[in-house]
Image: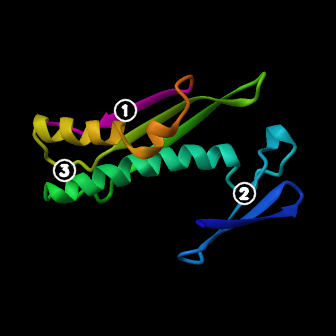
Amino acid sequence: MTATIVYTGNLRCTCTHLQSGTVTETDAPTDNRGKGERFSPTDTLCVALATCIITTMAIKANDMEIDLADTTISLTKHMLSDPRRIGKIDVILDFPASLQLNEKDRIILQRTGDNCPVMKSLHPDMEVHVEYNWGPL
């Protein structure tokens, strides 16, 4: 088992990661009767995608003796209705200016990110746009 989840009422869940004991909560978003005080379930899916991209890239980068620390990621979720679902996710990765990579290494890392496990788990109808901002060559 990976986690336990308790619905605590008022459209909130408390989720416990069993291996680490880490606890996180979710709320329904304000546009769907919630308080929006925590990540919504659809927010967590988008965050899972972005963190999977950078984590998978970092694993490959470590093998290449490249450090991706201080990379920042901006994330935008676009909802659709009928049925209510995520229609598009925009992910923008901004790598530190100090990271000087050649084109070959950039391509290898980008392909790794584009093929992370969460990306491969998304429905093909969901549009995903990933932008890699590497800075100057």
In the image, residue 13 above or below residue 132: below
Quadrant location of the C terminus in the rendered image: top left
Report the mark closest to the observer, 2 or 3. 2
Q: Amino acid at mark 3?
A: Leu
In the image, residue 131 above or below residue 18: above
Q: Is residue 32 left or right of residue 72?
A: right
**Quick one: label 2 or label 3, which is nearer the N terminus?**
2
Report the mark closest to the observer, 2 or 1. 2
Q: Which residue is mark 3?
A: 99
Q: Which residue is mark 1?
A: 131
**Quick one: label 2 or label 1, which is nearer the N terminus?**
2
Which residue is pictured at 18% across the width and 50% down the height? 99
Q: How many neighbours does mark 2 have within 10 angstroms: few (below 14), some (14-19), or many (20 or more)?
A: many
Q: Secondary structure at mark 3?
A: loop
Disc 2/disc 1 C-alpha distance (Å): 27 Å
> For the magenta stretch, what is the residue range?
126-137
Which residue is pictured at 34% across the width and 51% down the height? 56
Q: Nearer the viewer, residue 61 or 76?
A: 61
Q: Which residue is mark 2?
A: 26
